[in-house]
Image: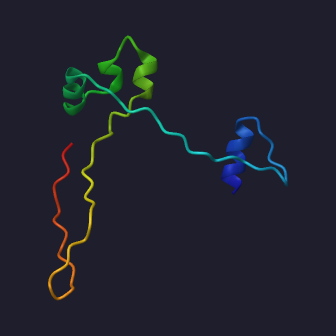
Amino acid sequence: MKAFDWQLQKKGYIPMSGQIVDASLVPAPKQRNTEGERQALKSGKSAKEIWPDEPNKAAQKDTDARWTLKIGGKVQYREDGTPLPMIALPVFG
């Protein structure tokens, strides 16, 4: 809690007893990269190298973000009632 209080004080808030802090989660916008930007990211270039004339955009981009493949759905069972093993698929990115 001391670290949390320190972060609040750093931002100018003084935590006192009886106060409520709202910790709402908000959706972040999805990244939309062009094909050229995607290739540059995959080749290992930094955001500052890809967007040298747009420092604000470069600061907001997460160059380490990758898509993951999520496996969902119903669990399937054998005739004896035991579940079938889940098939692991590779994650590309």
Q: Nearer the viewer, residue 78 or 59?
A: 78
At 74% from the left and 41% from the top, the residue drawn is 9
Q: Is residue 11 above or below residue 40?
A: below
Q: Quadrant of the N terminus?
A: bottom right
Task: Tell me the residue at 31%/20% (across/down).
Answer: 49
| Identity of the residue furthest to the front in this view | 79
- Which colour scheme appears in the figure? rainbow
- Which residue is situated farthest in the top direction here? 53
Front in this rendered view, residue 16 or 83 = 83
Q: Is residue 62 above or below residue 90?
A: above
Q: Residue at x 21, y 84 (%)?
A: 82
9 in relation to 30, above or below: below
Total marks placed: 0
What residue appears at the point 25 percent right and 30 percent down from the top-left corner? 41
Q: Position of residue 17 (x, y in %)?
A: 85, 54
In which quarter of the view is residue 30 placed? top left
Location of the C terminus by quadrant is top left
Q: Position of residue 5 (x, y in %)?
A: 72, 49
The quarter holding residue 84 reads: bottom left
Query: Where 91 sits versus 35, above or below?
Result: below
Front one among 52 and 34: 34
Q: Residue 37, position in %: x, y?
A: 25, 23
User: Could you tell me residue 52's position as x and y percent?
Assistant: 35, 14
Residue furthest to the bottom: 80
The reply, left or right, for residue 85 in relation to residue 1 is left
